[in-house]
Structure formats: structure tokens, C-alpha cells
Amino acid sequence: MAATVLMQLTGLDAWYGDKQVLHGIDVTLPVRGCTALLGPSGTGKSTLMRCIDAFSQTQEHQLQQDNWRASYQQGNVSHAPLQRMRVQQKAQRPAGMTGLQFFVEGQAQSAASVMQALRELFAQLQEGDLLTRLFANVADLSDVEWALFCILRAAQRAPDLLMLDEPTAGLADADAARVVALIERLAQTRAIVIITHHVQQARALAQHVVLLGNGRVVEAGPAGQFFAEPRTAAGQHYLANGTLPERSESGDGESALTACLIEETIETLSAGRVPRNGKINPLLPARFRWVVPDRLAGVSIPGLLREARQDLAGLQGAGINTLLNLTETPFDRELAAEFGIDCLFMPIPDMTPPTLAQAVDLCALLDKQMAQGRCVAVHCKAGQGRTGTVLALYLMWRAKGQWSGEDSVKAMRRIDPGWIQSASQEVFLSAFEQFIRRNVTFT
């Protein structure tokens, strides 16, 4: 294998149990530079990174860990085991630890030796202003400081290969730019593999691109060529739309576009911003709010402040074809049907949260609606307490344990300050956070 190539895997397949998630992947990592793994949610990017991580430690062509197994037909790792580190998306902060202790943990050197090494590393990478933050508790670091520390710690220990999963997730644009600048400097001295949904960041960082769709490579090659003139129709579609014209594995038949729209909403809210609007109609009720553009919204019950037919006409004009009613009285199905709108019913008493069983059923119901390509408006009476609570718990579900109950309340109130009205609803969202983290496994 050429001295410029760190790792090469040809014909890589991977499974979780009996489900094959990667099919015949070819990937080559150079000794230096950034390789971006692109593609819609659920198309195998994280699994490919896991395979790169695992095979970087051995010359074996087959590996198995619990229910995960992978193999490749040809290839090599230049000097396995590689010194590598992987930084997970929005890594959790260890309790009761200073920044310096975070860097020292697991190392044989003394804190003084590590501190001297960090002075040199931070100076080399133009991050000297972070030195004083080493003495702060990690809980007191800003989000961007914590993201930088996670990457710097990995860089300190991984001169060969650094793997970064959505390193700017949840950061404001200015903070994300600082993280991108650090990754650019690190890529001059080692191989970096990055998963990102931000095309502009990939354009700025990557020398090589691998675009995945449903566990297969749909285009790969030099980043300059890919971003200037992609060879495939799939590559052209991805750059134009941020997704691929195919099915994603994020749900039971859910389209890649829907998955990307939901992910975009979660990322936007996590960054402290309000999601963009979907289709708007002048007859929409005043309480109408898009959560996921052209997919999921919250609204008051049609007919609350004016004639129900006028509200239904506005909803129809905005593309809504399904109403999820949370009041204790079913909405008039025949009236809604006149406007091409189906009605779903999950009664919840006013000012209260759903039961845990109802919450799980609601998430499954909304997953099914998203998979069927429906456009859903959730409503209670005023479109505030119960509506905001259900929308919050569903986005917590889709965030796969990354959101706390408090995160979900803040996110919903960015869209509508009146959403989630009672203390019991807030308490329930915190309990639902714990339920997800303890009982739900996401793949």
C-alpha cells in the first residue's frame, strides 16, 4: 500500500444481527487530510465510522462485537494498531472534573507533564486562550469550549487517526466556525474522518468525500470535484437538496427528505434558533406553528376563534392532511374529511401530560404518520399546553436521547412561548427523558 494511504477497505459489509446495514463499501483514508462521510440520516455513516475504528486496530478482515459484525474483501491498514480516537456527538461531561483532570485521565504521565504538553499543543493549534479554562470544572465550560476540549484531548492521544461525529452539533454559527478552524489545522498532521450534515462545513474541511445512501456508496472522490461538479445524479441531488431521492432507514419507510427535515429541526432548536416555516396560507388559524416544515405543526382546535370551515380551509391550504386531536371530545371527522383531512384521536385531560403509555403510543403514531408521508397538525383546545407537550416529547424521541426534558421545554417555547403550560407537563418531560435513556435502544 502506498505510503500516502493510511487505511484501505474494499468490499466492506456490516450487520447488526441479521440486518445488513453496509453493502460493499470501498473507502481509502490518506495519511493526512479530512474525509467527510455525507448522506441522509440512517444511511450507515455511523456504522462506517465504527468499522473504520475497529479495523484500524487489526489486520484481520473479519470482526464481531456483540450483535455487530463486519468484514471486508481486500485492503490493509498501514501500521495497525493505529493510534486513534473517536469523539462522539455532544459527548457527556464527566461529573466533578476539571478540564486538566479530563486531559490527564487515563494517562501515565503526571499532571505537570500533561500540562506542559498541553501548553505546546494549544500553542501549535492556536488555542492558547483555552489554557486558563483547564482549571475550570468541565460543567462550567461553554458548549464551544467543551467541544474544543473533546477534540483537543483526542488529538493529544491520536496522532494517526481522529474520528469526529457531528462535532459542531448544537453550536451557534460563530462557535461552529471556531471548531471547523481547529479541525482544519489538525488535518494538516493526521487523518480525520468526520460525519456531518452541514454541506458548507464539509466543503470547507474535506479533501475527500464519501456520500452514502442506504448503506451503499453512491459517490466518492476528491472533495473539490464533488462540490464543483458531482459525477452522479445522486450527488447533484444531495448538493441541491441536502438529502437523497431514496428511502432512509431512520423509520419504517420514512423518506430521506422527511428524516432530514426532522433532523434539521432538532439541530436548529439545539442551536437556540427557531425552525424555518413550511407552507403558509392566509386562512391559517392564528395559533398555527410549524415545528418540522411541511411535516409537523401545532395549532388550536379548528373553530376556536372563528368558523371551523375557515380554519380547516387554511390548514388544507398549508398542506395539512391529518389532525391529531388531544382534547377529550373527538373532532368532527366528516367535516374535516370535506377538506381532505383525516382525524386521529388521543384524549388527554386539560393541563395534564399524557400517561407514559400514551407518550410511547403517540411517538409510534407520529413515526407512522411521518413514514406514510403525512403532514400532521397536533391540537388540543387552545393549542398550547397539551399540544406543546406532545410535540416536545416527540422531538425528544427523535433526538434519540440527546435532549433532556428541560431542553425540550426550552426548544418548544422558542417556537411558541405558550407551549407547555403546567408544572406537571414539565415534570413529565423530565420523566420521559429518563424513560428514553433507560429503556429505548436506537440503532
Image: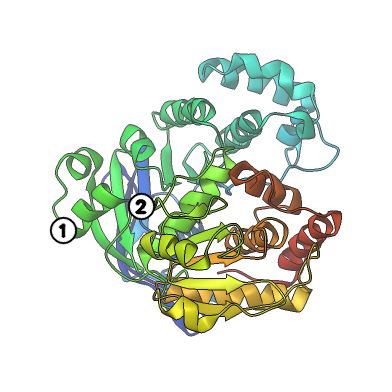
Horizontal and vertical percent for residue 164?
50, 45
Which of the 4 image quarters holds residue 293?
bottom left
Which of the 4 image quarters holds residue 225?
top left
Identity, as a three-letter code, of the amino acid under mark 1: Ala
Horizontal and vertical percent for residue 206?
33, 38
Judge from the rendering whether residue 93 lies leftward or rightward of residue 374; answer left or right. Answer: right
Note whether 367 is above or below 426 in the view shown: below
Q: Which residue is mark 2?
A: 38
Whole-angstrom CA distance, mark 2 to mark 1, is: 15 Å
Horizontal and vertical percent for residue 123?
56, 15
Residue 65 visible, this orientation: no
Which image quarter is the C terminus in? bottom right
- The residue drawn where x is 40% and y is 43% is 198
Identity, as a three-letter code, of the amino acid under mark 2: Leu
Which mark is nearer the camera, 2 or 1? Answer: 1
Mark number for residue 233? 1
Mark number for residue 326? none
